[in-house]
Amino acid sequence: MTVYSLDKLIAETRRLAAEYKRSTGQSLPVSGEIARHDAARILDLTLCEPRVGGVDAIGNGKREGQRIQIKSRILTTDSKSGTRLGQLNTSGDWNTLLLIIMDEDYEPCEIYEAARDDIMDEVDEAAGSKRAKRGALSVAKFKNISWLVWTRETGLEAVL
């Protein structure tokens, strides 16, 4: 048993990661864990430990039983266009993918969700490109095929 609650540890991790980035210009590799915590808290998900087959969480409530892969990106005013999601586990046993967009303080701004079939169609289409690695999509392309499920300003959106 730890002395600190998980919420306090995540808050301190956010603070340290943001300060490190401001001080060094380099990112600490913690955004994925912060995003998993935020997605579970905001969208009523149960995190999987250990993660198997690209499944980070299992849905509850409106997402009951859904197997979910979670990705994150820090987007700032100086972020490059063409920012990519990174490698997806395309062979995993997941149904939907969540993208948590965070600000420079590692706080969630928006959450998008896309169905596996839509993602796989885009990945297969992009596979012919020399620049596209298997299972990597741009944030812009992901936003085009997904739906917005949460924003910092308005909270939960209607689930399609």
Image (cartoon, rainbow, N blue to C red):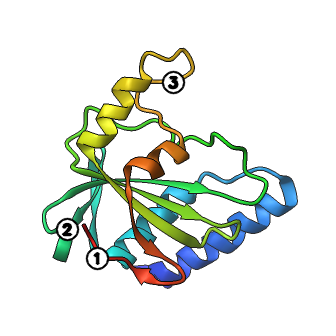
Residue 28, visible in the rendered structure? yes
In this picture, residue 69 sits left or right of residue 102: left
In the image, what residue occupies the spot 26% across and 32% down? 91
Q: Earlier in the sequence, mark 1 or mark 2?
A: 1
Which-is-in-front pick, marks 3 and 1?
3
Judging by the rendered image, the residue that carries numbered circle 1 is: 44
In the image, what residue occupies the spot 30% across and 32% down? 121
Q: Earlier in the sequence, mark 3 or mark 2?
A: 2
Judging by the rendered image, the residue that carries numbered circle 3 is: 132
| Tag 2: amino acid | Arg
Q: Please report contact status of discs 1 and 2: CB closer than 8 Å, yes or no.
A: yes
Element class at badge 1:
loop
Mark 3 → mark 1, Cα distance in angstroms = 33 Å
Judging by the rendered image, the residue that carries numbered circle 2 is: 63
Q: Quadrant of the N terminus?
A: bottom left
Mark 1 → mark 2, Cα distance in angstroms = 8 Å
| Tag 1: amino acid | Asp
**Image location (x, y in percent) of residue 36:** 42, 63
Q: Residue furthest left?
A: 65
